Image (cartoon, rainbow, N blue to C red):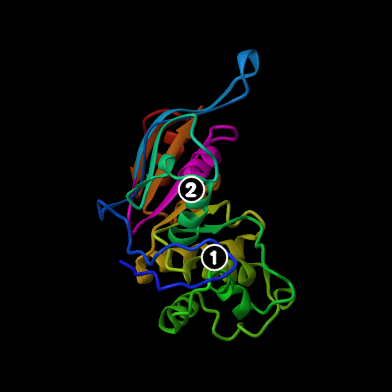
């Protein structure tokens, strides 16, 4: 459980200090009847079709499915980056539909971390400066104990003074992960975080993501199409044609392949 430090930014919207909003400490995010459609008439695309899902807190969950299955749309709706057409999304005990744009922006900043395929590091800042940037933008002090713990778990202590151009792809992604974790979010969403990495760097990054769950108590939800990446997760959610067809715990490869093919192992 975390406590958000008191903030006094002067140029961005602020909110009062908060404690985690988890109504059920075992659930980090949930969806009920989650539907997302695009277009209308003959051009309507049903990206999500009434999804019911609970994502456990303190675990590493992978979301998998074929191209066009709705896995990225599911993550975007759960993360408050895309609005549901119907149904509800609850994150850290808060119904996202009840938040206006400003409140939703604040909520994401205080309770959700993001890691994307692109590292999105500022090239003129060092690794250390990139890591603490979200805290500085929010006017929040750096919790040095938390900072050092995150940096240690991600193996970045000797890279903090390096610019992104001086880091490997795997190191840059670890900096991006540290940036997401240092704010102590309730949940971290990672969208194809190893998509730009070779196999060795991918294994390195995925191992560090798993360590963040084991050693920092984080909740990580990762969209991936790679079986090797999903093997690092505690749970795997499989989606086909906008419908969740399986929610597996520590599946073997045969079980996972069968679920992805839409049949029983």
Q: Is mark 2 on a helix, strand or loop?
A: loop
Please report whichever mark, 2 or 1, sits nearer to the chain's N-terminal start: 2
Residue on which disc 2 sits: 79
Quadrant hosting residue 218: bottom left
Q: Residue sitting at 65 percent across and 18 percent down?
A: 43
Q: Report how far apart the C-alphas of labels 2 and 1 lie in the structure.
A: 21 Å
Residue 127, image x and y in percent? 63, 77
Q: Is residue 228 above or below residue 85?
A: below
Q: Picture coordinates of residue 122 (x, y %)?
A: 70, 69
Residue 128 rendering spot, x and y as whole percentages: 60, 80
Q: How crowded is mark 1: few (under 14 residues within 10 Å), some or many (20 or more)?
A: many
Name the residue rendered at 41%, 54% in the picture: 233
Do the numbered discs 2 and 1 sit on residues whose CB atoms are within 8 Å?
Answer: no
Callout 2 crowding tier (Cα within 10 Å): few <14, some 14–19, many ≥20: many
Q: In this view, does 99 lie to the left or right of 2?
A: right
Q: For residue 166: magenta?
A: no
| The C terminus lies in quadrant | top left
Residue 63 within the magenta-colored segment of the rendering: yes
Residue drawn at point x = 62 percent, y = 72 percent: 171
Above or below, 164 relative to 60 = below
Q: In the rendered structure, which segment of residues is drawn in magenta?
A: 55-78
In-front residue for pair 222/179: 179
Mark 2 or 1: in front is 2
Q: Mark 1 points at which residue?
A: 205
Residue 177 circle label = none
Identify the element where label 1 is drawn: helix
- Give the residue displayed 60% in from the left and 67% down from the top: 11
- Please give the count of numbered marks on the rendered protein: 2
Quadrant of the snapshot with the N terminus: bottom left
Residue extending furthest front?
10
């Amino acid at each position: 459980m975390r406590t958000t430090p008191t903030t006094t930014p002067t140029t961005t919207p602020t909110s009062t200090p908060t404690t985690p909003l988890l109504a059920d400490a075992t659930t980090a995010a949930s969806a009920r009847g989650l539907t997302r459609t695009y277009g209308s008439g003959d051009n309507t695309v049903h990206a999500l079709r009434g999804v019911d899902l609970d994502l456990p807190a303190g675990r590493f969950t992978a979301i998998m499915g074929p191209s066009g299955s709705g896995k990225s749309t599911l993550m975007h709706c759960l993360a408050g980056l895309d609005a549901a057409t119907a149904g509800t999304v609850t994150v850290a005990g808060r119904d996202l539909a009840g938040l206006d744009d400003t409140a939703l922006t604040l909520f994401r900043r205080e309770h959700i971390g993001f890691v994307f395929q692109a590292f999105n590091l500022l090239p003129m800042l060092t690794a250390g400066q990139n890591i603490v940037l979200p805290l500085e933008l929010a006017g929040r002090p750096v919790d040095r104990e938390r900072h050092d713990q995150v940096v240690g778990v991600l193996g970045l202590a000797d890279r903090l003074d390096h610019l992104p151009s001086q880091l490997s792809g795997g190191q840059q992604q670890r900096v991006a992960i540290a940036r997401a974790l240092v704010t102590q979010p309730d949940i971290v969403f990672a969208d194809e975080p190893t998509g730009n990495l070779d196999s060795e760097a991918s294994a390195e990054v995925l191992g560090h993501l798993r360590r963040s769950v084991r050693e920092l108590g984080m909740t990580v939800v990762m969209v991936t199409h790679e079986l090797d990446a999903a093997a690092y997760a505690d749970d795997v959610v499989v989606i086909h044609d906008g419908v969740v067809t399986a929610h597996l715990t520590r599946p073997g490869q045969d079980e996972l392949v069968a679920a992805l093919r839409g049949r029983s192992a």
